[in-house]
Amino acid sequence: MRNLRYFMSHSTGTPTPAPAAEAAKGVSDLFQKCFDFTRADEVKAAGFYPYFRAIEANEGPVVQIEGRKIVMAGSNNYLGLTAHPKVKEAAIKAVEKYGTGCSGSRYLTGTLDLHNELEVRLARYMGKESCLLFSTGYQTAQGIIPTLVQRGEYLVTDKDNHACIVAGYMMAKGMFADFVRYKHNEMTDLERVISKLPRGAGKLIVTDGVFSTTGEIVNLPDLVAMAKKYNARILVDDAHSVGVIGRGGRGTASHYGLEAEVDMTMGTFSKTFASLGGFVVGDERIINYLKHHSPALIFSASPTPASVAAALAALDILEKEPERIDKLIRNADKMRQSFKRLGFKIIEGQTAVVPVIVGDDMLAFQFWRALFDDGVFVNAFISPGVPPGMQMMRTSYMSAHEDVHLDRILEAFEKTGKKLGII
């Protein structure tokens, strides 16, 4: 799995010794790993630490950090709706009507008419019978996977799936389900692993629709063929797909014309929908089962009124203004072509994510810092979050970016690329 949560999993510093008295007794200290972890401190001391930078004001394509205006080229705010007046107004009105929270789970006292309205709207938008909301996108996978995949059943997962899916299958493993992984987006390897499983056993193939690090789109047609051949169901995580690809932004299955062939699609509100929360759509009987069996739903406080109202407003805009998607893709395509013209190595794609390869951990930190000093914010991905040699500046774009923003990003990349000898 290539996920940023592992970006600093190893320390290069000198371990801090455990207290002498404890060490003398040969007692293992639970917190010793915390004392041993020094990599973040070393990067901070070098002045290159790119993480946890506080945003003081957010206008979409431009933010304020440390008192400076910065062009944002690292956000997943794909349609630029977090600053849209209608989205902000909807959130404010929801707080005024319902208060700040629901004070209960969906199962008990935490369901509002807003939740039901958004579920109906999302099911219709995604072309499925039913929908269920979760409090976060990350939690959604944990609410689906271990609830459906149980003892004697199998989870089949892409090695590069998002961390939320990994957490979901680790929970399923704890329920005595089995899981197997196949090489990233390689359908021949998917057939190799799935063909070895008992044909009569229940199986769920889970994949990202758009892989969050690289922006690649899953080979869904071949994956669907494998599912049919080997008696498997399909769950697609469209966190980075909805509002980006497909007819009117309806995601990966729509992109390929395979809506009827994908059993479940999950997504998040923290990207296109300018809010916080998650959802899954599918057949009514499947969603009904999740409603009554998913611990992540039953034992979690429900999504807040403001979050749900903001997502509803964003869905309104998405449905009424599909041209925003066209502009988003035009912006990303412009950057792909421009980076290549400047001499940068990128990962090709058709989505809002455009990774620029720099190929070394320290070079990535230096590149990030130079861009930041020049007024551009991107995301630095280093090993082991990405394979050695694939360290990158992960850039992502919005429909709200104008040419003046994109040209500014390119200017900063060109200057830094030449300075560091990358181009």
Image (cartoon, rainbow, N blue to C red):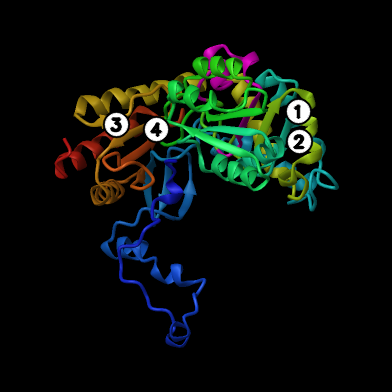
Amino acid of disc 4? Thr
Residue identifier under label 2: 290
Q: Can you say which quadrant of the picture contains the C terminus?
A: top left
Question: Magenta part of the protein: which range?
Answer: 244-270
- Tell which residue pokes out farthest to the top in this image: 257
Residue identifier under label 1: 286
SS for dot 4: loop
Can residue 125 be seen by looking at this rendering? Answer: yes
Amino acid of disc 1? Ile
SS for dot 3: helix
SS for dot 2: helix
Q: Are marks 2 and 3 in contact (CB under 8 Å)?
A: no
Q: Which mark is residue 407?
A: 3
Mark 1 or mark 3: name the one nearer the start of the chain: 1
Residue 248 magenta-highlighted: yes
Amino acid of disc 2? Leu
Looking at the image, is 253 positioned above or below residue 42? Answer: above
Label 1 crowd (10 A; few <14 / some 14-19 / many >=20):
some
Residue identifier under label 4: 214
Label 4 crowd (10 A; few <14 / some 14-19 / many >=20):
many
Q: Nearer the viewer, residue 304 or 226?
A: 226
